[in-house]
């Protein structure tokens, strides 16, 4: 009707759309100003650190900056045979400055990542270079250690020439680019990251499953009990939630250790003999038990909020129409709780996949997860760029899971409350 | 096929939720096959509890309920074969209208062709044939209501229970749905037990009405009897409008009695009073009292008009009569010119037959 007459005008003759925009402009600005603090907060505390993490994970300028003359000289070198004299000279000059400034250690560590055994060679060079005479540096350097005659080591230096690298990401999945620049897997006995990735996924999956199996009846009871009892039960669900994460994990350690309460109980009821107490901690069992307990409220609450909205008359209707309680449950009640299941599972899975403290404390060697590895590189090896790379891989993994989830369930179907 | 007189039978049923208060007290009720019985009462009177006991969602604390002569207390709800329409329809929001209707048939493992046939029939019965693929959320309240009715009937239950099914609809829709449900009942002859607190609804639809109060059936009779001949003052008060006089019997003989009020005396029909000196409440329907009656009536009083409210088809007049300033009259809107003006004194007359002396309040 109105589209035939073209643009609709207000009584004053201004096009309606424009008039509407003008009338709403003030409200829009107000709304934007109200969300500005949050927006800034998100940018500063979320976007910026992630961007920084990303640049750190691919940043390789450190070596490039430490050996400027060497890399300039190496530009013409094809890497097939030992480099010419100019490269040796440039390297000697670069390295001399590093030793003088006492920053050679960093280079030694970095190059040792690239080629095992580089550190000792460089250390020896640091000691000997003081007595070097001018000219014919190639001969002098090669005399210090026979490895300098091996072209592999020079290629290792050249590989670090670009300012940016994706090698950390390859390392995260137990791969590296070899001397020929091909991407290959590391030796079988050194593939630890893949085990950790799959273990992390496995633990997250089972913790989500256990949480779901335990939370569903709790949430159902919470939603159907009279107010007086459901409040009490709600407090029971939330009470652990209000307790420090560390305290809860520590109490699981007290419960689960070999001389702990649970084992004492098993011995007391005669389930196991005293000298045959099962190990329930410092392995995957401990991680499962403690993480399930800690993440349970995250499953209960979304389920509860969805179940609360399901009218009890629906189940009654199902039964009155001739469905057995089980059929009525699976055909009527269960499908209506799917939004809550989706929200709970997504929440628990994503939290579990990046969980750190609990696996670190009760996980032991066979119960550590990828997050523990990230922490290890942050704190012990100080390989921050590798830690950043793995952190970003984890983040990407979570986003992929979210995407798959969105395809399967639909984000619109998620209800958090 | 002869109709069974006590198709549904409540036999001395008591119900208590907390072991302290009886919500339903000694309920005895026989419902004939094919009958439309309404349980009417204020909220908290136990009518919904009775319905839930019949559906199987509550167990009687004492007594037994029989369905077609079989005791059903130990039969779970899904085996009773009783259709039910819930207060808020209780349509399954994740299923289409068709799937909602097919649900009771699918759980009974009926073949696909039969399901299609039955669902189509049920949908056309409530004139919603076009709506099979809609979700319940896309329907209006009245349409959802009709789907709920169709779903309760689609599996040919012997009894259908309706728990205030029209409560959420607006007035016009409620009225048209009342007729629709009444016609469906007449057409398929199913036994209906209907719960409502709306007396208009009960009077329109039912064969018989059971008026509940305080966990007890106060009166069980046809709508006209209930209105014309209430057996106690609760029923008189609850059904329709009612003018009351509280007084004491001063004389009782030949099927009529004299009731002494604070001011004056009236002649009434003794229903639940037997002897002189008893306290009583006399109930007179507003439309039974006439202004300036042409025929002679045995009660004639003068009253002063205190309020006049125009209602379109009738005019409501509040009088001060014999010390009762809440005496209501309904004057039909006719060409007759009555002198109804505020402050006027008018003559009011009624027959003693229509002034029922009931139990004191």
Image: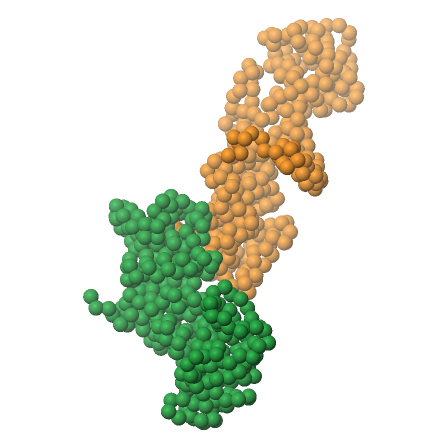
Residue placed at 54% from the left, 24% from the top? Answer: A175
Q: Report the residue that reaches farthest toward the right.
A: A100
Instruction: Please state which of residues B323 and B70 is positioned toward the viewer in this rendering.
Output: B323
Image spot of residue A25 (x, y percent):
68, 37
Image spot of residue B89 (x, y percent):
42, 56
Q: Is residue B231 visible?
A: yes
Instruction: Please state which of residues A149 and A245 is positioned toward the viewer in this rendering.
Output: A245
Quadrant position of residue A68: top right
Query: Colour scheme used in the picture?
Result: by chain
Quadrant position of residue A10: top right
Q: Chain B: give its colour.
A: green
Residue placed at 45% from the left, 50% from the top? Answer: B140
Q: Which chain is orange?
A: A
Above or below for A406 versus A85: below
Task: Answer left or right for A381 relative to B180.
Answer: right
Residue placed at 29% from the left, 70% from the top? Answer: B32
Instruction: Please state which of residues B96 and A85 is positioned toward the viewer in this rendering.
Output: B96
Above or below for B232 versus A219: below
Q: Is residue A146 visible?
A: no
Image spot of residue A268 (x, y percent):
49, 61
Residue placed at 57% from the left, 36% from the top? Answer: A370
Please state, as top left, top right, bottom left or bottom right, where the N terminus of chain B lies in the image: bottom left
Image spot of residue B300 (x, y percent):
48, 84
Above or below for A267 versus A211: below
Instruction: Please state which of residues A117 and A235 is positioned toward the viewer in this rendering.
Output: A235
């Amino acid at each position: 009707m109105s589209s035939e007459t073209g643009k609709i005008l207000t009584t004053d003759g201004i096009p309606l759309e424009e008039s509407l925009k003008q009338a709403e402009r003030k409200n829009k600005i107000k709304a934007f100003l109200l969300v500005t603090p949050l927006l800034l907060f998100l940018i500063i505390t979320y976007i910026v650190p992630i961007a920084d993490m990303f640049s750190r994970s691919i940043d390789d300028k450190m070596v490039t900056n430490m050996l400027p003359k060497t890399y300039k000289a190496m530009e013409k070198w094809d890497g097939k045979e030992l480099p010419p004299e100019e490269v040796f000279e440039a390297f000697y000059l670069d390295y001399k400055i590093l030793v003088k400034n006492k920053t050679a250690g960093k280079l030694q560590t970095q190059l040792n990542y690239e080629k095992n055994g580089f550190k000792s060679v460089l250390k020896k060079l640091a000691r000997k270079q003081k007595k070097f005479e001018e000219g014919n540096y190639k001969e002098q350097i090669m005399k210090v250690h026979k490895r300098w005659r091996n072209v592999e080591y020079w290629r290792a230096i050249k590989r670090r020439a670009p300012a940016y690298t994706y090698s950390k990401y390859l390392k995260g999945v137990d791969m590296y680019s070899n001397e020929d620049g091909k991407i290959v897997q590391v030796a079988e006995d050194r593939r630890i990251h893949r085990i950790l990735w799959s273990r992390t996924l496995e633990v997250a999956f089972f913790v989500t499953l256990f949480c779901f199996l335990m939370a569903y009846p709790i949430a159902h009871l919470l939603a159907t009990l009279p107010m007086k009892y459901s409040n009490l039960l709600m407090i029971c669900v939330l009470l652990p939630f209000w307790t420090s994460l560390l305290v809860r994990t520590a109490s699981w350690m007290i419960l689960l250790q070999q001389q702990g309460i649970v084992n004492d109980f098993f011995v007391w009821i005669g389930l196991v003999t005293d000298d045959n107490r099962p190990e329930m901690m410092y392995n995957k069992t401990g991680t499962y038990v403690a993480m399930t307990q800690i993440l349970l409220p995250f499953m209960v609450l979304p389920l509860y909020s969805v179940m609360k909205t399901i009218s009890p008359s629906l189940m009654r209707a199902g039964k009155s129409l001739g469905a057995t309680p089980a059929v009525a449950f699976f055909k009527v009640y269960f499908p209506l709780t799917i939004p809550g299941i989706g929200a709970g599972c997504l929440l628990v899975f994503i939290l579990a996949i990046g969980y750190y403290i609990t696996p670190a404390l009760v996980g032991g060697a066979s119960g550590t997860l990828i997050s523990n590895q990230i922490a290890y590189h942050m704190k012990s090896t100080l390989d921050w760029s590798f830690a950043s790379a793995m952190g970003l891989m984890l983040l990407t993994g979570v986003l992929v899971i979210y995407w798959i989830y969105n395809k399967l369930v639909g984000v619109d179907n998620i209800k958090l409350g | 096929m002869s109709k069974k007189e006590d198709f549904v039978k409540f036999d001395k049923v008591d119900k208590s939720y907390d072991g302290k208060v009886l919500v339903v007290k000694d309920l005895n009720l026989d419902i004939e096959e094919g009958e439309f019985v309404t349980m009417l009462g204020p909220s908290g009177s136990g009518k919904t509890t009775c319905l839930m006991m019949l559906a199987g969602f509550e167990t009687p604390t004492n007594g037994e309920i029989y369905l077609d002569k079989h005791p059903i207390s130990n039969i779970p709800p899904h085996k009773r074969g009783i259709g039910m329409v819930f207060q808020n329809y209780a349509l399954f929001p994740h299923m289409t209208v068709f799937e909602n209707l097919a649900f009771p048939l699918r759980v009974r493992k009926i073949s696909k062709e039969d399901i299609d046939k039955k669902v189509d029939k049920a949908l056309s019965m409530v004139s919603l044939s076009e709506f099979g693929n809609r979700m319940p959320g896309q329907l209006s309240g009245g349409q959802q209501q009709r789907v709920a009715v169709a779903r309760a009937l689609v599996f040919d239950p012997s009894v259908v229970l309706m728990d205030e099914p029209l409560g959420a609809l607006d007035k016009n829709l409620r009225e048209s749905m009342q007729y629709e449900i009444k016609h469906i009942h007449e057409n398929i002859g199913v036994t209906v037990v209907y719960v409502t607190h709306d007396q208009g609804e009960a009077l329109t639809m039912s064969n018989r009405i059971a008026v509940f109060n305080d966990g007890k059936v106060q009166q069980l009779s046809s709508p006209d009897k209930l209105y014309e001949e209430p057996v106690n003052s609760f029923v008189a008060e609850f059904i329709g409008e009612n003018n009351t006089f509280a007084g004491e019997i001063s004389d009782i003989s030949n099927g009529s009695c004299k009731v002494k009020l604070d001011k004056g005396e009236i002649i009434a029909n003794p229903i639940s009073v037997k002897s002189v000196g008893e306290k009583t409440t006399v109930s007179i329907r507003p439309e039974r009292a006439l202004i300036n009656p042409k025929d002679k009536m045995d009660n004639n009083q003068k009253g002063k008009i205190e309020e006049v409210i125009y209602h379109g088809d009738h005019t409501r007049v509040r009088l001060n009569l014999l010390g009762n300033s809440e005496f209501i009259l309904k004057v039909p809107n006719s060409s007759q010119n009555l002198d109804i003006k505020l402050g006027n004194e008018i003559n009011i007359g009624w027959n003693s037959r229509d002034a029922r002396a009931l139990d004191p309040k």
